[in-house]
Amino acid sequence: MAARLLPVLLAVLLAGLAVLAGAGSAGAHAALTGSDPQQDSVVEQAPKEVSLTFSEQIAVDEDAIRVLDPAGNRVDTEETPRSLGSGGAQYAVKLRAGLPDGTFTVAYQVVSADSHPVAGAFTFSIGAPSETSAAVPDQPSGGGAVGALYGIARYLSYAGFTLLVGGAAFVLACWPRGAGVRPMQRLVAFSWVGLTAATLAMLLLRGPYAGSGKLGDVFDLEVLGGVLETKTGAALVSRLLLLAAAALFVAVLFGAYARREDPKERRDLTFGLAIGGTVVAAGLAATWAMSEHASTGLQAGIAMPVDVLHLLAVAAWLGGLTALLVALYRGPAVERAAVRRFSRVAFGSVVVLALTGLYQSWRQVGSWSALTGTSYGQLLLVKIGLVALLVAVAGLSRRWTGRLGEAPGDTGALGAEGEGASAPNSTEAATDSAPDSGDGERAEVVVATAEASERAEAGRLAAGQGAEAEAGAPGAESAATARVPVQADPAREAQLRRQREAASAATRKKRRDGDPERSGLRRSVLLEAGIAVVVLAVTTVLTTTEPGRTEEEAAAGTSASAAQQQGPVSLTVPFDTGGKDGKGTVLLDVDPGRSGDNALHVYVQDPGKEPLDVPEVKVALTLKAQELGPLAAPLERISEGHWSATGVQIPLAGSWTVAVTVRTSDIDQVTVSKNARIG
């Protein structure tokens, strides 16, 4: 069964890698939400600077924002962009004086706070639009061969962490005897090697991945030096240092711990390894939390420790599941108690995953529309479905485990061949890891035939010796000479030993195939591992996909910007004064929504969208970038819930803060505000 199902697991793994490769450049997490001048706008005079606003904090270098004239020449001062505040989400570059009329191109390439590169371009015109020959890179940021390699390294790093932590935890907490089993040692050691290699690859690829996109820059020391100064570079270096500590842990686990015989010494060493291993595992998980989704956005101080717990739970469940699979198919006898202990660990991990995953989903999505209408939300639904399927299969595995535990009078171990073993050093256990042979009966016939042949040859030799003795053969020397041919033949003994082992393995395989509980557990665990591979691939793609909450905010900002360019500005601002009938919504219209003379209309509605008559409403406008305002609008009551003002002068175009003060009683009042692009 293993020979037939393991290729299926490999195919699923390759499919997961294919999904990952296809998603190479999916992740622009910091979206451009505004600019001054606006995209496709026409301004009468050349601006002194160009500013960009993003949905989250970004990192920039001296070439992060470039402004090109119609001929493709840079017209910015080529200095590092200047932060305008807003939590590091708004930057500006100064322009040279004396710019001609025509269409200018603004190209940007920055790195979002969760480590993903973001690139794009837009145009604006001075005086009137014109033709432009400015060229911007066609390849999206984070794409191409570098992006594909970086994505594969990211996937392998997640897989390596899961198998390293989960495999070591399985040995330490569930199956201590596995510390001396070669397949388990290889699983954990190769996982450490894979995680270390993937981390080094990500460190070298990080520079071109977030910058030039050229594979030749991988070994550029100047580029690497710039990476080391970033948050992502610091996280990768920290991961390498923690992997050095993990190597010491693995050496002790499969060295001194595996050889320890004294129960007290083994117990003390188990406690020390558990504490040290937990600290190292949590530190490794924190290197992802501090550099990706959890480190930015809402409640980052809570999200990072929650992300660490989530990653540890994933490793304990899926990594331990893989270790159990290796033990069942490649290792010696596995005690049923070890399988039951892992079943309890897996159940606890699933509970932690459900709680932490629910919080992370709310944080990254935030609304039903984002869950169903964005790429991140749809991928999240796929992951939820796969995890639900995985839990269902895990429940089936628990049922098989329970049946094994209920076997009356059966206290043996579940081995690679599914047969009970009385002790790890017994002859039966010593041959448990032998590969499956063909039919058991055929092998037994071969062994019986060989043994019969050996007995016949020994009989013939003995008969010859007796005849010589009766014929008066010489004394002791002749007798000794006669006994030489019956001395043991090492090659023959080795051949017979191999045949006996093959026959024993085939017999155990035959009995195993006739045990539905054991074969059922193996099949269900293998199916769990296959689904887990796909879950890991989808999770990796999610880390490179713009969160649904951010995507919706960016779309809303783009829509608002387009609406502002086409005509009047409309705002919807909810309020709550805290008193009786203190909740409602303010609808505010600025017409025509450009610099100069404007008319202002304010509508106040209750939660049922009916006009709400309140004692007082005030509106003030502030342009923080130019330190203008607040400019009060002289509102007059027109009808129930409707106020207006005419001749409202807006001197400059820009991102204005509109503050609305609503008073619903003598003591209940609140001021709410919203930003709007006017002009």
Image (cartoon, rainbow, N blue to C red):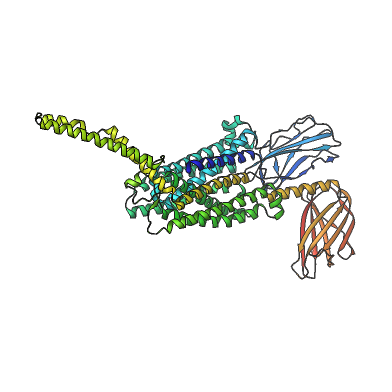
Q: Which residue is rendered at x = 65% and y = 55% of the image?
A: 362
In the rendered image, residue 513, in percent from the top left (x then y), is placed at 44, 47
Question: Residue 95 appears at what percent x and percent y?
Answer: 76, 36
Residue shown at 84% from the left, 40% from the top: 43
Q: Residue at x 56, y 35 (%)?
A: 204
* 659 relative to 550 in the view: left or right: right
Tell me if 38 is positioned left or right of 372 in this view. right
Q: Quadrant of residue 477?
A: top left
Does the image show residue 282?
A: no
How many numbered marks have been drawn onto this rendered protein structure? 0
In the foreground, 325 or 363 = 325
Query: What is the quadrant of residue 186 in the picture?
Result: top left
User: Is residue 565 or residue 307 the one in the foreground?
Assistant: 307
User: Compared to 635, does 219 lie above or below?
Assistant: above
Report x, y in % for residue 103. 82, 35
Measuring from the top left, give residue 435's x and y in whole percent. 41, 40
Say if 300 sits above or below 496 in the image: below
Image position of 39 with respect to 222: above or below: below
Look at the picture and state if 550 lies above or below 203.
below
User: Is residue 217 something that shows in the picture?
Assistant: yes
Left or right of 315? Residue 27 is right
